[in-house]
Amino acid sequence: MQGIHISVMGCYLPAQVVKNQDFERLVETSDEWIVSHTGVRERRVSSGEPTWWMGVLAARDALERGKIDAASIDLILFTTVTPEYYTPALACIAQAHLGAHNAFALDLNCACSGFVAALDMARRYLYTGGVDRVLIISAERLSAITDYTDRSTCVLFGDGASACVVERGEGLYSSHLSADGMGASSLYAAHGEPAENPFADPALAPEMPEIFQGEKLHMNGREVYRFATKTMAQEVRAACFQAGIEVEEIDLVIPHQANVRIVETAMKLLGLPMERAYLNLEQLGNTSSASIPLAMDEALQKGAIQPGMLVCAVGFGAGLTSGAVLLRWE
């Protein structure tokens, strides 16, 4: 069985805690409304830490916990939707600060599905030769793109980072990834205005659709909810089908920590009790690609994940993208 082994995890959370009551002075909302509609009570927010630095600190935590030499890393995959730079890749910046000088490094933007996609990509590299150890870093500074005048979205998001080291394993592994670009306008954050081009002639520009407006994060909550509840169940079932197992055999589901209502609906569609879903969004909110590994690391620390358990990580996000990874924990 060409499985994977997550040998160690690490995390970094900003010290700044923002509670629901703090939003009452920004928008028309309340702690009761936020909790009842999202399940979130508080979140961490960067006080200046950039995405790349939070990622480096999470990676250092993982390497220190596992007593792993950074020089033994062959590949760094950095998942984020909030990079500080067009180029270089944050993975390259992390490589330099970690001393992982033998590693190839690249960024991956799959939004909230990023960690699941990175796990699947790591496995493919591990079994195509030349790579024995992959470092996945998932870091997000969503406060940098959040519209704090939009009461429907600003209460959802938080900042943070997680990292893990992935190696070949002997246990069961299955995955399924999907994308639906037709829904791209339902969830997006556009870049700012580009630099002025002195050679551009508007008369020569071809006609093209304008799909995104504004520079802050925009979300059509109703459309995303409809997509998320349906696709989460579909991705889990698809991963189980490929593995030849029944959904009921899953011991623990670690979903993207977007909204407790979404998770409750998806678990109901799967026929699984909520007790089998691990949630920490109450304390951390939605941290995009960092949400699943942050929850996974916490579950490990609290003993909710044990060797031999069948664990399913499932995510959905902008793109629209979705995916699930099913693995026997080693």
Image (spheres, rainbow, N blue to C red):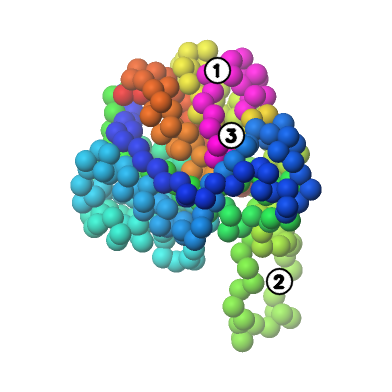
Q: What distance separates the C-alpha of mark 3 from that of mark 2? A: 47 Å
Q: Identify the residue shown where x is 48% and y is 13%.
A: 249
Q: Quick one: 117 or 146, which is closer to the camera?
A: 146
Q: What distance separates the C-alpha of mark 3 from that of mark 1? A: 15 Å
Judge left or right: residue 196 versus residue 125.
right
Mark 1 and mark 2 lie on one chain; the one further toward the N terminus is 2
Question: Dot 1 corresponds to which residue?
Answer: 275
Q: Which residues are magenta?
A: 263-286
The answer to the question of whether label 3 and label 1 lie on touching residues, with beta carbons closer than 8 A, is no
Picture coordinates of residue 163, whole percent (x, y)? 38, 43
Residue type (three-letter) at the residue carrying disc 2: Pro
Residue type (three-letter) at the residue carrying disc 3: Glu
Q: Identify the residue shown where x is 71% and y is 80%.
A: 202
Mark 3 and mark 1 lie on one chain; the one further toward the N terminus is 1
Question: Dot 3 corresponds to which residue?
Answer: 282
Is residue 182 at least partly visible in the picture?
no
Dot label at residue 165: none
Question: Dot 2 corresponds to which residue?
Answer: 206
Judge left or right: residue 69 versus residue 6.
left
Picture coordinates of residue 292, whole percent (x, y)? 49, 36
Residue type (three-letter) at the residue carrying disc 1: Glu
Q: Identify the residue shown where x is 29% and y is 33%.
A: 7
